[in-house]
């Protein structure tokens, strides 16, 4: 398992906390930034880096995590890439359903919402596998149509 992370200035502190947690679990990761607060950076740049890494990746156990103020901008940008299914999740249940039903491969989180248990959400996303049912595979294939 490998995790690709990206965050803008509003998400970089939470990203660093998640990186420390990943290190503690000895999970490999690539950190695409931001590495410091820069109010002039754009979420788009980090979302693109993670999406490109994910589209060139063939390991179904690998996934991305994107963080910005709301998670919305990151999801919008990442979902413009074929093969990317970025989901904004604010609970473990949403993370599990995004993985099971939609084979989400990028988890988008709101760095501004302090009430979420991010580790619980990431664990749920990481530990849940897509359902093998043909109905869900058909629907996921339609997400990749342009």
Image: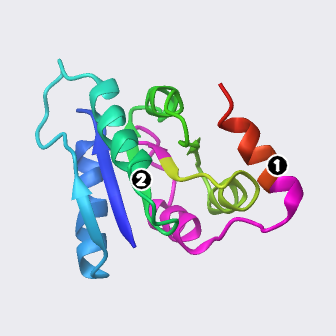
Mark 1 is surrounded, within 10 Å at the Cα level, by few (under 14), some (14 to 19) or many (20 or more) other residues, namely few
User: What span is colored magenta in the figure?
Assistant: 108-136
Q: State which quarter of the image contains the N terminus.
A: bottom left
Tell me if I can see residue 111 in this picture.
no
Q: The C terminus appears in which quarter of the rendering? A: top right
Between marks 2 and 1 in the image, the one whose residue lies nearer the viewer: 1
Q: Secondary structure at mark 1?
A: helix
The residue positioned 41% from the left and 53% from the top of the image is 64
Quadrant of the rendered image containing residue 17: bottom left
Mark 2, Cα crowd under 10 Å, few <14 / some 14-19 / many 20+, is many
Q: Is residue 136 visible?
A: yes
Work out how far the residue at label 2 is from the one at label 1, CA to CA, in angstroms: 23 Å
**Which numbered tag is attached to residue 138?**
1
Q: Is residue 60 left or right of residue 24?
A: right
- Of 117 and 48, the residue lying toward us: 48
Residue 141 on the magenta segment: no
Q: What secondary structure is found at the residue carrying circle 2?
A: strand
Residue at the image position 23 percent from the left and 58 percent from the top: 30
Question: Percent from the top left, x then y, of residue 139?
Answer: 80, 45
Residue marked by disc 2: 64
Relative side of 28 to 145, left or right: left
Q: Which residue is depicted at the point 34% across and 25% down? A: 44
Q: Residue furthest right?
A: 135
Q: Position of residue 8 (x, y in %)?
A: 27, 33
Of residue 71 and residue 45, the one placed in the foreground of this image is: 45
């Amino acid at each position: 398992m490998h995790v690709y992370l990206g965050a803008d200035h509003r998400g970089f502190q939470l990203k660093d906390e998640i990186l420390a947690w990943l290190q503690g679990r000895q999970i490999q990761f690539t950190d695409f930034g931001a590495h410091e607060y820069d109010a002039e950076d754009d979420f788009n740049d980090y979302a693109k880096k993670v999406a490109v890494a994910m589209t060139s990746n063939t390991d179904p156990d690998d996934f991305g995590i994107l963080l910005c103020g709301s998670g919305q901008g990151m999801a919008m940008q990442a979902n413009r890439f074929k093969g990317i299914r970025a989901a904004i999740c604010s609970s473990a249940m949403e993370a599990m359903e995004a993985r099971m039903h939609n084979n989400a491969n990028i988890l988008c989180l709101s760095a501004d919402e302090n009430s979420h248990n991010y580790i619980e959400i990431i664990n749920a996303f990481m530990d849940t596998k897509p359902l093998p049912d043909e109905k869900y595979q058909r629907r996921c294939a339609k997400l990749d149509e342009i």
